[in-house]
Amino acid sequence: MFDGCRLLRAALSSAWLAVALAGCVDHTGAADGRLRLGMVTDVGGLGDRSFNDSAYAGLVRARDALGAHITVVQSRSAADYQPNLIVLSNKGFDMIFAIGFLMAKDLSDVAGRFPERHYGIIDAVVDDPNVTSVTFQEEQGSFLAGAAAAMVSKTHQIAFLGGVDITLMRKFEAGFTAGAREIDPAIRVEVKYIGSFDDVAAGKELAGVLFDQGADIIFAAAGKGGVGALDQVRARSGDYVIGVDADQDALVPGKILTSMVKHVDRGVFLLAKRAAAHTLKGGHIVLGLKEGGVGLTDFTYTRSVMTPARLAKLRVIEQRLENGTIVAPSTREELASFKPVPLH
């Protein structure tokens, strides 16, 4: 229930340090027959304190728990994806992870060229026999985030700040908006997109605009761009940001209401365990609330506004999402027909 991701915090501290290293972070050591895992980041890279760092935490867990050798190759632009995947494919890894939906086409091309290798991709479905795809029900965790925001908001106006306006991000947007309406049907939810997942300055500027226009809580689902929103909220009294992907609560204690954690680390570790057990096969794995794939952090720094009564209501909503009584919309079309469900 509202997992605080304590394991992630320790692992991610290593990831943030790793951003100082250029290109390849290699811990493979000698070819000694142990499990070998490779990973290609998206352009946000290590140190994004979000999606890529969470994936890296799963890789670190595989190193510590399974004795795996790990290598990370960082992508500076989308043009690096295919060459980086090819580099790892030529080195005999047991499992190669492509982190992010933007790598789907490049991964499909590479997987066809290296049928003897096995690949995992996060946030996209690649229909090749040697690729295992892992996606998440982001709309469920975002629904909880929206409900929490609506409970706390004093202006009855909140905002969603996304990275790029694409189908995946609309799952966050639709779920968040619906969750807020579940609590306050009349609440105003502003929506803006940065147009990038790594533009910190633009994230900070747009967050400032949203706050100035009356929003007092912003769900910043924008990768490294969301760090700009965290910077923006530091000096704003009474305003909050909701973090995303990893547990970001401690980055600005008391100013991050909660984080909608997408447990990319668990997806990575799940596939690493299958690689270690030699049970890898192609297919599609979906992780939602029930599977522990998404969820909120535990409001460690914001219990003054997230009261026991509000937490209890969130737990009811979580249970309804898990049993299907509430179905979180994942598209704007589904959001348009969403109607709040009585909680009593």
Image (tube, helix red, strand yellow):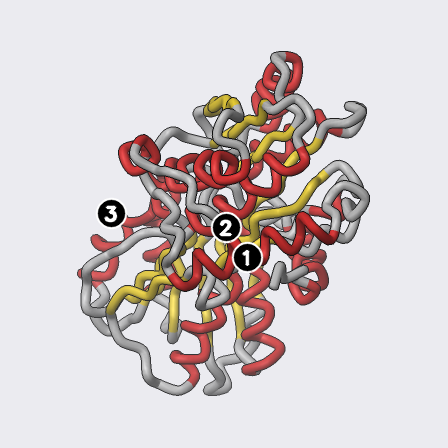
Answer whether residue 278 is visible to the viewer in this image.
yes
Q: What is the distance, in whole Å, between disc 1 and disc 2 at their CAs? A: 7 Å
The answer to whether mark 3 and mark 1 are in CB contact below 8 A is no
Side of 52 where 134 appears, left or right: left
Quick one: label 3 or label 1, which is nearer the N terminus?
3
Q: Amino acid at mark 2?
A: Leu
The answer to whether mark 1 and mark 2 are in CB contact below 8 A is yes
Quadrant of the image occupied by residue 339: top left
Which residue is pictured at 41% across the width and 72% down the height? 271
Q: Dot 2: few (<14), some (14–19), or many (≥20) neighbours within 10 Å?
A: few
Which residue is pictured at 78% across the width and 29% down the height? 234
Q: Which residue is mark 3?
A: 105
Q: Dot 3: few (<14), some (14–19), or many (≥20) neighbours within 10 Å?
A: some
Q: Dot 1: few (<14), some (14–19), or many (≥20) neighbours within 10 Å?
A: some
Where 43 falls versus 316 (above or below)? Answer: above
Residue 213 percent location from the top left of the image: 61, 12
Pick whichever, 283 or 189, lies toward us.
Answer: 189
Q: For the N terminus, which image quadrant?
A: bottom right
Pick whichever, 113 or 256, lies toward us.
Answer: 256
The label number, if any, that marks residue 316 in the structure image = 1
Residue 210 percent location from the top left of the image: 59, 18
Callout 2: SS: loop
Residue 277 percent location from the top left of the image: 40, 87
Which residue is pictured at 52% across the width and 22% down the height? 188
Quick one: label 1 or label 2, which is nearer the N terminus?
1
Q: What is the distance, in whole Å, between disc 3 and disc 2 at their CAs? A: 43 Å
Q: Which residue is mark 2?
A: 343
Q: Amino acid at mark 1?
A: Val
Side of 267 where 254 appears, left or right: right
Callout 3: SS: helix
